[in-house]
Image (cartoon, rainbow, N blue to C red):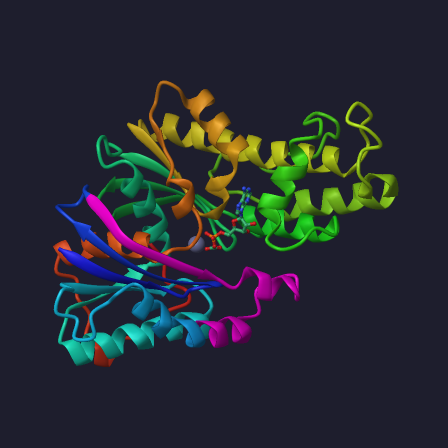
Amino acid sequence: MRLLGLETSCDETSVAIVSSDGLRSFVVEKSLIASQAAKHAEYGGVVPEVAARCHVNVVFPLLEAAGVSHDGADIDAIAVTAGPGLVPALRIGVEAAKTLAFAWKKPLVAVNHMEGHIASAFIAAVETPPEFPAVCLLVSGGHTELLLMKNFCEYELLGRTRDDAAGEAFDKVAKLLDLPYPGGPQISKHALEGKRGAIDFPRPMLDSKDFDFSFSGLKTAVAVYLKTHPESLSPNPSPNVGGGIEDVCASFEQAVVDVLVEKTIKAVAKTNAKSVIVSGGVSANLLLREEMKNKLSPLPVFFPSLEFTGDNAAMIAAAGAWRAERKEFIDPLKFEADPNLRLA
Ligand code: KG4
Ligand code: ZN
């Protein structure tokens, strides 16, 4: 099956063409991502109306650039992110997909963005895909969730953040440090030069019996530390002398990673999972990848390839293939974006 995927849930406009052969085999023929991050950096975060305007401007030029035929003759189905996400942003992709499905008379699939992030790990693992049940840690700018994937399209929620998402914590701490948006890659970069044990930031909810997370207290701890240690807003005086922004980034990053890894280990123990999937924007974090693999070994841990960690339409098309296989098509005349869509 050859699917056209569209993704506009946040600040990336993306179009992809993906061929699927069964549920585990994907070939990404085209993947185009137009990021608006630089635009939103001016505001320090994503502004929904600005995002929508940017999506409108580029969605059809991207379809053209991807070489999508004007009659859709070589496309079997259209998959689009239906939610969760920012309503004004989601609607651009949804309306474009509805229009194409209506005009081309092609089946339309409404994809949950989080299922797209899960599917991104399957794109990278075509040879030996994750076995079920799999514990999925979804870590992005808007979500932090632990799910049990019992089979394709079958999920059970284990836990989620009670306040900020992990990526949001990276973004907010970056703001405190005067680093540009998005904060995750910036903090990781500075952390490479810092000492991870320099500051003892809290590991929120590490010992709680459930699988929930909380990151807003950690962000506040960083804010309090910066107030009492204003010198740490400057770079380390030299690589051997700590006390600068590098140590704050390294210690903060370690605290987030410790919580994510420990909770995942506990989830595996409780569910007897056969594999772990870590995906979403924060899964690009190299410390997280390293520690997940080391501490869960010999259990296989799957990540998307780096090009598909952030929001992209290839993962939406891949998840769309799972839903299309089940014939879960949606009538373009009755379909609206749902910002609160849940997987489980
Ligand atoms: O999945 P995504 O692209 O968009 C959402 O659906 O939210 O995730 C974006 C988030 C941002 O918060 C960004 O700071 C974070 O992913 N991120 C990272 C890294 N790269 C991106 N966080 C930590 N380390 C990274 N290397
Ligand atoms: Zn996302």
Q: Which residue does the image show at 85% across and 46% down from the upper left?
A: 227
Q: Which residue does the image show at 42% across and 41% down from the upper left?
A: 306
| x, y percent for residue 31 | 33, 55
Which is more toward the observer, 144 or 55? 55
| x, y percent for residue 62 | 36, 67
Q: Quadrant of residue 237?
A: top right
Which is more toward the observer, 265 or 55? 55
Locate residue 176 relative to residue 62 in the image: left or right.
right
Q: Which residue does the image show at 44% across and 27% down from the upper left?
A: 265
User: Which quarter of the rendered picture does the N terminus lie within?
Assistant: bottom left
Locate residue 49 relative to residue 98 in the image: left or right.
right
Locate residue 232 relative to residue 281 in the image: left or right.
right
| x, y percent for residue 169 | 61, 48
Vertical placement of residue 242 versus 80, above or below: above
User: Within the magenta stretch, is there residue 51?
Assistant: yes
User: Within the magenta stretch, is there residue 72?
Assistant: no
State whether residue 257 appears in this view: yes
Residue range (magenta): 26-55
Residue furthest out toward the top: 298
